[in-house]
Image (spheres, rainbow, N blue to C red):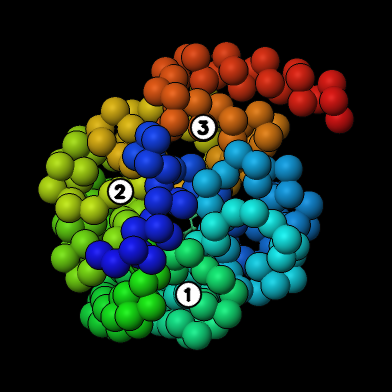
Amino acid sequence: MDWGMKNRISRIIKPASGRTVMLAVDHGYFMGPTTGLEQLGRAVGPLLPYADTLMLTRGALRYFIDPAVDIPITLRVSGGTSILNKQLLHEGSVCSIEEAIRLNASCVAFSILVGAEYERDTILEFTRVVDQARSFGIPALCVTAVGRDMVRDARYMALASRLGAELGADIIKTYFVDGFEKVTETCPVPVVIAGGKKIPEQDALQMAHDAIAAGAAGVDMGRNIFQSENPVAMIQAVRAVVHDNASADEACNLYQSLKVEVSARA
Ligand code: 5RP
């Protein structure tokens, strides 16, 4: 792995902890104006100091984010179907590697749909993106997105994650399930978890804690942060779990106290 690739990865997965808090706000490419991201720039601004990287589309970056920001960008480069399409996440490239370089991306993100009837399309296109990104020293994050009718168990997640890594991914993003050790122990690259649909803050912090305990390198969380009652407090509580090994209870207490503090400042 060349110097540039290592440097880009170390800006995302912090060497001090070997972990990362990725803030995912790329939902618009298939969900449109997701609750909490109607005004993406306003929602994301206060969270940036606490995120290790911002995951979003080229359009969101261009139209909502100030180019003066000091945060590594993880650019969503796959797409092609919306939530209105029954073949959700039948994705291909929607952003060239030249565009990713132009936007100073530190990482590119692409979803594969392992087990879907069209898995081959997504997998072959992913490997083309890996080849292009790697030729410029840019790491590729493989989102092993779970299709509507996939069984969410450790066996499936381990298969999808290992497949993504063997095809060249530098980071895997998948979903937390019981027995998650099976996923991290058999995957040769760092694994981060998506947060999934909004759940109570305590449960989201417990999930983050359990994922870290099972060997995850962090989270790539979106809705459970920006749809939280207090996103600024929530992302800091997530950081405590990921980077400071806080327990779920400690993080929840931190969330509650920060909520008061952040609200008082508002
Ligand atoms: C969809 C994605 C999204 O980035 C991810 O699902 C959003 O994060 P969260 O689930 O935590 O809202 O990868 O394929």
User: Which of the 4 image quarters holds residue 148?
Assistant: bottom left
User: Residue 224 or 64: which is nearer the viewer?
Assistant: 64
Q: In terms of sequence position, does the residue under pointer 3 or pointer 2 come before the other?
A: 2
- Residue 86 visible in the current orientation: no
Element at label 1: loop
Measure how far apart labels 2 and 1 are at the Cα level: 19 Å
Which residue carries the number 1 mark? 77
Element at label 2: strand
Q: In terms of sequence position, does the residue under pointer 1 or pointer 3 come before the other?
A: 1
Measure how far apart labels 3 and 2 are at the Cα level: 16 Å
Which residue carries the number 2 mark? 191
Q: Is mark 3 within 8 Å of ligand 1?
A: no
Residue 239 has which mark?
3
Quadrant placement of the N terminus: bottom left
Q: Amino acid at mark 2?
A: Val
* Mark 3 neighbour class, 10 Å CA radius: few under 14, some 14 to 19, many 20 or more: many
Q: Are marks 1 and 3 in contact (CB under 8 Å)?
A: no
Looking at this view, name the residue that lies furthest to the front. Answer: 3
Q: In terms of sequence position, does the residue under pointer 2 or pointer 1 come before the other?
A: 1
Q: Are marks 2 and 1 in contact (CB under 8 Å)?
A: no
Quadrant placement of the C terminus: top right
User: Residue 50 or 156: which is nearer the viewer?
Assistant: 50
User: Which of the 4 image quarters holds residue 198?
Assistant: top right
* Mark 1 neighbour class, 10 Å CA radius: few under 14, some 14 to 19, many 20 or more: many
Q: Amino acid at mark 3?
A: Arg
Q: Residue at x 39, y 70 (%)?
A: 138
